[in-house]
Amino acid sequence: MSRFKILAVTDHVVDSLHSPNVKNRFGDVDCVISCGDLPYGYLDYLVTVLGKPLYFVHGNHDRDYEYTENGRRHLAPQGATALDMRVVKGPGGLILAGLEGSIRYDPESGHQYTQEQMDRRATQLAAKLMGHRMRHGRYLDILVTHSPPFGVGDGPDPAHIGFRAFNTLIQRFKPRLLLHGHQHRYYGPYGVPPTTQVGATRVMNVYPYQLIEWEDDRAG
């Protein structure tokens, strides 16, 4: 039986995490997962202070690069592992996969996709998951996205509709968890719960952060 802790973050810089006190509160986590729309410097800080691996997907507001204070251009958080369109082994044998971005509502912004574009991306990821099962015996444990699935913790406005492709992935591959952001819990009058059970999958809105205690004999 594998037991470990995950600090999941998304969308909003939390002052109490962006401080030395984060080591006292979350120094025992095994990894950090970002669901997007966070400054690279914030994620770099968590990696540096906690000294744990970081896995991430981009959100719809993420830029293709950020400049640090010394003028260096970074394309991603330093020392982090990108999950978009990938299947990755994490701590304790945990299997992670990810899909970035949100529904396309602003043609000038990156990391946004139509439903049809995300369908194609999800199909490509599904092929990788099939291959992973052939090699390692199972598909995945956690699917990391920025947006929620369609109709599961998403919003009715054009910028916050979820992706139908995620519902298909949940049904077919049955990850134990789907972690997402994008939908702020205080956003509008929707009253969206942070966690929804969909079949075998727990869909969790981690905004702005969640401590997840993982216990699963599949990930050992």
Image (cartoon, grey):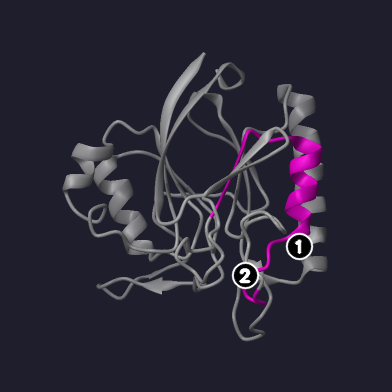
Task: Indicate which disc residue 118 carries.
Answer: 1
- The spot of residue 150 in percent (x, y) is 72, 59
Tell which of 8 and 48 is nearer to you: 8
Is 69 above or below relative to 7? below
Is 29 above or below relative to 105? above
Quarter where residue 31 is shown: top left
- The spot of residue 207 in percent (x, y) is 45, 56
Q: Would you name the residue on which mark 2 appears?
A: 160
Q: Residue furthest bottom?
A: 108
Is residue 16 rendered to the left or right of residue 217?
left
- The spot of residue 164 in percent (x, y) is 77, 58
Residue visible at 51% across and 73% down? Answer: 61
Q: Residue furthest top?
A: 1
Taking the magenta stretch, the answer to whether it contains residue 178 is yes
Taking the magenta stretch, the answer to whether it contains residue 164 is yes
Please state, as top left, top right, bottom left or bottom right, where the C terminus lies in the image.
top right
Q: Which residues are magenta?
A: 157-180
Tell which of 52 and 191 is nearer to you: 191
Quarter where residue 4 is shown: top left
Is 8 above or below relative to 12? above
Q: Amino acid at mark 1?
A: Met
Q: Earlier in the sequence, mark 2 or mark 1?
A: 1
Q: Distance between the Cα atoms at labels 2 and 1?
A: 15 Å
Q: Amino acid at mark 2?
A: His
Residue visible at 68% across and 68% down? Answer: 161
- The spot of residue 166 in percent (x, y) is 73, 52
Is residue 9 rendered to the left or right of residue 162?
left
Tell which of 58 and 10 is nearer to you: 10
Task: Indicate which disc residue 48 carries.
Answer: none
Residue visible at 51% across and 50% down? Answer: 194
